[in-house]
Image (cartoon, helix red, strand yellow):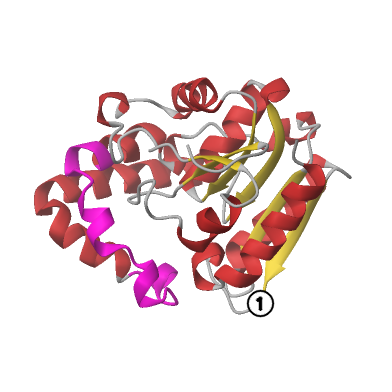
Amino acid sequence: MQGHGPSVTLVHGFAQNRECLGPLAQDLSTRFRLVRPDAPGHGSSLRHADADLERGAELLIATSGRSNLVGYSMGGRLCLTAALRDPDRVEALVLIGATPGISDPVERSDRRDADRALADRLERIGMQAFVEEWLALDLFAALPAWARFDQERRTNTAAGLAASLRRAGTGSMAPLWDRLGELAMPVLWITGAADPKYGEIAERAARAVGPNARHEVIVGAGHAAHLERADATTAVVSEFLQRHGR
């Protein structure tokens, strides 16, 4: 933990760890008490590698206590699951480049097969090659050099990340669209303007939550808005948490 003030728990994305949060974590630690856990299967959380999202949400709540939750991508799915599991312990929710899951069963099954195939490949080629392939995806093309976190990513293990893909990947996630209206806390969805797929998801999700939710688009950013446009995203998140966080 670092900083003082209301608690904010910040959860990284897949194949990252708690050291990959960049200026967002640095800024929030000046105003809040920051909790930065490693997600199951990542960093130091290897003994929980087989945790699915429900178990991961339980572990997250146990670690963070009553807190404001901020999650990126996979971390956003984990935070959303936690907010629905134990809403009384979540003051406000910020989701960056996140999805409530895949509603269509055929599409979800295809994604589950793809996640498992990627897990198999990861175990076969090892972390060094996987990190190079992962960061070469179009999804991360706009990341500045400092935000690639090559060395930090390589401290993960192939076994841990593969377990995360199989147990907590988007394909294995029970879709949460029908439950979004249960979220009574303030909710902020953030997407980059260059990430239209997740922008459409966030817009639809914010409407499903209701008047306590809003969708903010970060110009000049793609999927990892908090890293690609750290200044703009940090300002939006900080303002939201200072207004709604306790």
Specify whether 168 is left or right of 201: left
The quarter of the rendered structure image containing the C terminus is top right
- Residue found 49% across the figure and 66% down from its top: 227
Does 61 sit above or below residue 70?
above
For the record, the magenta segment spans 137-161
Q: Residues within 10 Å of mark 1 (few under 14, many from 20)?
A: some
Q: Position of residue 132 (x, y in %)?
A: 22, 66
Total numbered labels placed on residues in the image: 1
Q: Is residue 142 magenta?
A: yes
Q: Residue 152's quadrant in the figure?
A: bottom left
| Image x and y of residue 208, in percent | 79, 43
Is residue 103 visible in the rendered structure shown here? no
Q: Position of residue 215 (x, y in %)?
A: 75, 57
Q: Which residue position holds label 1?
A: 219
Residue 151 is a magenta residue: yes
* Helix, strand or loop for the magenta stretch, by majority: helix
Quadrant in the rendering for residue 160: top left
Whether residue 74 appears in this view of the structure is yes
Picture layout, residue 177 above or below residue 56: below
At 35% across and 47% down in the image, what residue appears? 17
Q: Is residue 25 above or below residue 229?
A: above
Question: Would residue 22 be found to the left or right of residue 80 on screen?
Answer: left
| Picture residue at 23% right of the left edge, 46% below the top | 156
How far across and how far down the image is residue 78, in percent? 52, 36
